[in-house]
Amino acid sequence: MKRLLKNFLPHLAYFYHHLRYRMSVLLITSIFVGLLDGLGLTMFLPLLELIADPNAQASSEKLGNLAFLLDGLRTLGLNLNLNVVLLTMLVFFIFKGIATFFERYMRVVYQQFFIAKIRLDNIQALSNYSYNAFVHADAGAIQNTMSGEVERVMQAFRTYSTMLQQLVMILTYAALAFLASPEFAVLIVIGGVFSNFLFSALYRKTKILSSELVKRNHTFQGYIIQAVAFFKYLKATAAMQGYSEFLRLKVLDIEATNRKMGVLNSIMMGLREPLMIGIVVSVILIQVNVLGGGLSTIILSLLFFYRGLTSLTALQTSYNQFLGYSGSLDNMSSFFNELVAHANTPGRQPFTAFEHSLELKNIGFSYQKNRPILQAINLTIEKNESVAFVGESGSGKTTLLNIITGLIRPESGVYLIDGLPVNDLDIQSLQKHIGYITQDPVIFDDTFFNNVTFWAEHNKTNLGRFEDALRKAHVLAFVHGLEHQENTRLGNNGISLSGGQKQRISIARELYKQVDFLFMDEATSALDSETEKAIQENIDELKGQYTMLIIAHRLSTIKNVDRVVVMKEGQIENIGSYEELLEKSHVFKRMVELQEL
């Protein structure tokens, strides 16, 4: 059953996967609404009969196979007079109102459940997404899918659920019309199929435009992200106007695609009702003049058809709107599948604390075949040892650090921590013990407290830990000097802070976490010499308290580390203290000399 749904009704399968029994609830309530409405409409025919002669008794012969309604009332001992018919009709429509309320209420509830589930599933899948896959991913597509596309998928579900409801209503009315007059009903169905065939080309074009719209939105979101990230450069070089013009053209492309979809929808809306009325007129003429049908059954069938026509119009409108969102639905499904397909597969062994050493044995890695980044890396790092990695750009320093942090897995060799293979460890439990400080500090647009504590509860214990981390990072006095102290908001990427202040906040955040490792990737290379010296003194004070791995560009900052690892073309060229390497490593000595020029 699942395979059939996935192959022939992929969108229904997608919604059912997320909603399960809730889809059945919506369909069943829609059936009740249509059935109660149809039964209420059936009472119009005896009502018209009784209005013509109030003293008469309603007859069931003209109702065709729906005669059971009046026959049932007679069985209950009721006289089929005007009062009984009116009250029966009222009862049907009261229950229809109750069913309609329940159906609409459940649809709203399920819509909110659906969108929350989509968002939560995507957040969880993104949190498990491997770093290696993320490096090759389209940032604009991720941004657009996680934000704008979610709303479009919500609209897709709203229109699809409306479409299903109207389909159920049509089938219900068709069944009732068939019971009243089979020939009339069959002719109407044939006409409806013919009209749908005429619209099929417009449906296909709408679906194509929907897919194009998704791609254009992805591209636009990617350029918006870059506009924010590079705003300072664009503004300082007067390039913002040119970039804005480039973005304007992208907006116009999106607008043009939306306009085309709107034109197609308008064409269908304009054609639909005249076409359907034309079909009705043709069928009535055939029924009366060719098939010799009775006018009373045609009137009853026409009542059902009128309701069915309303539902069919709503169905076709919803279907066209759904096609406009279907590209987003397909994109959301493929996006989620991509995240899941490249999810991390952590081991089961929890990491509790770093006790002895980490070992890299014959490690190799490459992003592309036949282009190795690391080759035959053998290295042991003891607890609380400070080790610096130096080398030219492309020598493999950052890739090696990414392997040590568990961001990527080596393609060959073994990586051990305290004798346990890292592949057997729950990688997230390991990474919780890692402090990571980059060249570009990570500053959230939030308060000092939330930036350092990562949104921990603002209580006495956490505040004490917060101030202790600030003290170790030499930024406590600065925070206390602010008007709102720890509640001061830092702005977009800490725009009001200096480079040194940002870096100290980054250090404080990692110290607050109470980590075992401190990894620094070019942590001071973007700072001026005086600020760099101050930050370096902070780092030197932490030496011996943590296992510190440092990627350094400025070699003067690593004179005090325990060991320096010199890398060249993806291999370890030499290892030793700063002074030892000046004596035995020609590569290192040359690097130092070049920086002293």
Image (cartoon, helix red, strand yellow):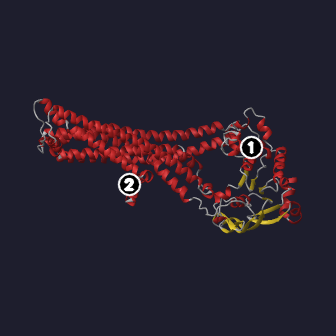
Image quadrant where residue 283 sits: top left
Q: Position of residue 536 (x, y in %)?
A: 83, 49
Q: Position of residue 532 (x, y in %)?
A: 82, 47
Q: Secondary structure at mark 1?
A: helix
Residue at 84%, 46% in the rendered image: 534
Q: Secondary structure at mark 2?
A: loop
Q: Position of residue 420 (x, y in %)?
A: 68, 67
Of 361 and 590, the residue lying toward us: 361
Of 262 and 443, the residue lying toward us: 443
Mark 2 is surrounded, within 10 Å at the Cα level, by few (under 14), some (14 to 19) or many (20 or more) other residues, namely: few
Q: Nearer the viewer, mark 2 or mark 1?
A: 1
Which disc, if any, is residue 464? 1
Q: Which amino acid type is marked by label 2?
A: Leu
Write down the residue under mark 2.
9
Q: Which amino acid type is marked by label 1?
A: Gly
Horizontal side of residue 194 vs 220, given as left or right:
left
Residue 50 in sight: yes
Of 230 and 578, the residue lying toward us: 578
Horizontal side of residue 414 vs 139, given as left or right:
right
